[in-house]
Every structure is written in C-alpha cells, then in structure tokens.
Image (spheres, grey):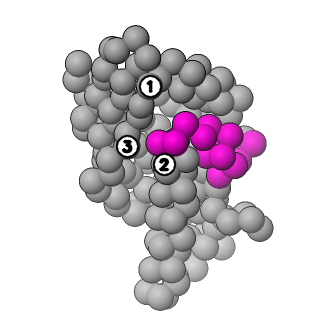
Amino acid sequence: MKTNIFIVALLLCSFGCTSKQKERLSKQEEEQIKKEIIATDDSIMIRLDKFDVEGALKFYLPNFVAFGSEGEKYSLEQLRKSYLNFYASAASYKWTNYNIDFLSITKEKVIISQDAKNEWVMKTGNKGTYDPSHYTFGFEKTSSGWKLFYHHFSGTFIK
C-alpha cells in the first residue's frame, strides 16, 4: 500500500512541477476532458470484455508501463502477451466499474482512480473475481486522442 501511495504522489507531483501544467482549466474544459477520458476508458474495457486485446491496446502509448498487485512491472509488450495468454484460456470476462475519481486534470495529462469488479471464467471451468479492484490510470493527450501511459492495479481476490 505504501508503494501505491508513493507512486500516485510521485505522478501528481510531476504534473505540478511545470508552469504549463499550472494553467487553470475552466469548468467547461474540465468537464469536456472528463467526458473524453470516460469515453476512452469505456472503449478500452468494452474491447477487453469482447477479448479484443489488439483493439484495446490501440489506446495505449508505446512507452506504457503498468504495475500489478504483487509489484510486477509490465511494458506494453509484456502486457500484450499477458492479455493474449489470459484471453486464450478464458471462456468469459466481465468488468463492472462502480466508481471513478479524477485525481489530476491538465490539458495534456489526466490521472484517475477507478474501482471495479473483475470476473472471469476459464475454459477449464475455474472462476475468479477481484472485488474490489482498484486501478490508477494515467492518460496523455495525443493527436489521435487520449492514450494510456500508466496503470497500477491492486485488489482483493475472491475465489
């Protein structure tokens, strides 16, 4: 847990250290960015629910990095392999989002925390659930829309 807090604090600090980041957004700009982030996040999760790994990964930057619940670090290519292996063995997957908080919003970067439930059934019949699942996601604005550059996961596994 201390690592999670440190990483989020480091990300938030890094966004506040440049004068460009300190520009105040209007309420309308903030709300528009929130809508865009939610639409991007939904697009990713809908694709993952449909086992469309490559479609979901179109919303990720090449320098993406992720951290898992046991401290493991993933590059984009490692995450791709992990997702492809999981979905090759899965019979079903369902993501149920029940909370999203916007922690930091600038014109170029947004950090959110998201609480959800992950449920799956493997082709072997084994089932799994993480509830709650807690994520921290970092999005960056690009010429082709918002892309993920960071995520961190922690959760409670329920058999």
Q: CA distance from mark 3 to mark 1?
A: 14 Å
Location of residue 9 in the rendering, given as x and y in whole percent from the top left corner: 43, 47
The quarter of the displayed image where residue 21 is located: bottom right
In the rendered view, tell whether residue 22 sits above or below residue 14: below
Q: Residue at x 31, y 23 (%)?
A: 128
**Residue 109 among magenta residues:** no
Which of pointers 3 and 2 lies earlier in the amino acid sequence? 2
Between 23 and 66, the one lying in front of the other is 66
Mark 1, Cα crowd under 10 Å, few <14 / some 14-19 / many 20+, is some
From this view, report whether residue 159 is shown above or below residue 55.
above
Q: In the rendering, at what x and y percent does residue 3 appear? A: 40, 31
**Circle 3 residue:** 95
Badge 3 crowding class, 10 Å Cα cut-off, few under 14, some 14 to 19, many 20 or more, is: some
In what element is the residue under mark 2? helix
**For residue 51: magenta?**
yes
Assess whether mark 2 and mark 3 are in contact (beta carbons under 8 angstroms).
Answer: yes
The residue indicated by pointer 2 is 45
Q: How many marks?
A: 3
Magenta stretch in the rendered image: 48-62
What's the amino acid at mark 3? Trp
